[in-house]
Amino acid sequence: MLAAYSVSEVSKYIKALIESDDFLQGVWITGEVSNFTLHSSGHMYFSLKDESSRLRCVMFRSQNSHLKFMPQDGMSVFAYGAIGMYERFGDVQIYVEDMMPSGTGSLYLAFLQLKEKLDKEGLFSPSMKKELPEFPRVVAVVTSPTGAAVRDVITVITRRAPGVTVLVVPALVQGDGAPESIVQALDLVNRAGFIDVVIVGRGGGSIEDLMAFNDEKVARAIAQSGVPVISAVGHETDFTIADFVADRRAATPSAAAEMAVPDLGELEKTLFQLNLRLNSGIRASVSDNRGNLRSLVRSHVLRFPMELTRDHRQRLSLAGDRLCDFIAGTLSMKREDFRVLAGRLDSLSPLKTLARGYGFIRTLPGMSIVSSVGQVMPEEDLEVVLQDGSFTATVKSVKEGETRGGKG
């Protein structure tokens, strides 16, 4: 029997095939925008077409909110996204994640490729970031000496920290020679040996204008700098490779200057307030402690200190007397117990038995006590121990079964 599948089953199968293809899950496509619609929800719906084909596209509001241009019908663009299938209508479409006019597409692709490469090498890692000094004495600025950026930096640093020296290190920030010029300026800053922090940047511009700060040599020079680097390239919405690899990123040159030095005026105000609070706290503490001291001086305990120990001394004396009585009584009891035990031990002493005319016999070689006739042999020499000494005797004969009257 011929198997038949539902439309939904086939749609799901096709969807699974498309979404399992890694190539289709992240692809750049160039084409012309057509049938563009910006929905009230904020989502964008349109198509990309060329001479022979058309693809449906959707770019959700969360993705298109960062676009710097509004797509229009007839506009040539680069679009990046994943190709999928909308099951309900069976439409194959692109879920667009990023998009730009095709004129800047090649530069942006180069930017993304370099960003991915350096990120894999760890140049963007937080562990690579150096801390900025809290109170720098010399701040270097690598930028064009005639641009607005350097004037902004000098103005802000002079206002916030008048005693800080600002050293302008001239560099090209645009054009073919700009990357090499920035690298040389950073090398000069590091060889100087007296610079505390360096600001590298320029004013805003198009992606073409900012390409010097998307250069790999510039990125590596910033990463290898022994002096902490603040990147201040473009305006707040602009990002470059230099921003990712620098120790800190500032939205504008003015913000970089604020980041580089503390506001000494505000710091002075803060210290003044802290000084007032410290003095007030000390005065209050001294006043409180002076009052406490007066109370203590007038207290009965300090005026008559011996009264505090009188009762304790009496209790200690009574406790000492009770302890001496207890020890004396215990010694008397133990002494009597010792006398009784000594009497019992004396009554059991073998010397008492010897004093009554008895003795004991032991073998001469081993000095073992003889308690049975089975332990001796005729002609054996034995020692007889009495109360006042001992003598040696020789066994003439051995008789068993008699306990009295025998001779030895």
Image: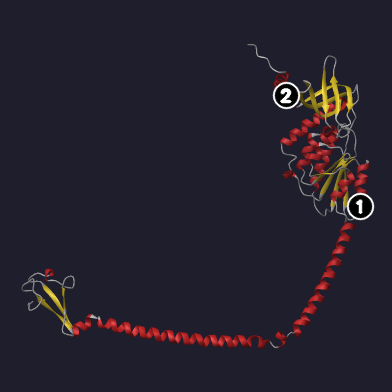
Q: Whole-percent x and y of residue 251?
A: 86, 42
Judged from this view, the residue extending furthest toward the front is 1
Q: Amino acid at mark 2?
A: Phe
Question: Hey, which quadrant is residue 181 in on the image?
Answer: top right
In the rendered structure, the answer to whether residue 21 lies left or right of residue 72 reads left
Circle 1 or circle 2, nearest the eye? 2
The mark that comes first in sequence, 1 or 2, is 2
Instruction: Give whichever of 320, 146 is nearer the camera.
Output: 320
Q: Whole-percent x and y of residue 197?
A: 82, 48
Q: Whole-percent x and y of residue 131?
A: 77, 49
Task: Report the number of discs.
Answer: 2
Q: Callout 2: few (<14), some (14-19), or many (20+) C-alpha neighbours within 10 Å?
A: few
Residue that appears at 85% across and 54% down: 262
Q: Which mark is residue 23?
A: 2
In the rendered structure, the answer to whether residue 406 lies left or right of residue 29 reads left
Q: CA distance from mark 1 to mark 2?
A: 54 Å
Judged from this view, the residue extending furthest toward the top is 1
Q: Label 1, on which residue?
A: 158
Q: Whole-percent x and y of residue 53?
A: 82, 16
Question: For the residue labelled by badge 2, is the local secondary structure a helix, a strand or a loop?
Answer: helix
Question: For the residue labelled by badge 1, is the local secondary structure a helix, a strand or a loop?
Answer: helix
Question: Hey, which quadrant is residue 314 in on the image?
Answer: bottom right
In the rendered structure, the answer to whether residue 386 lies left or right of residue 255 reads left
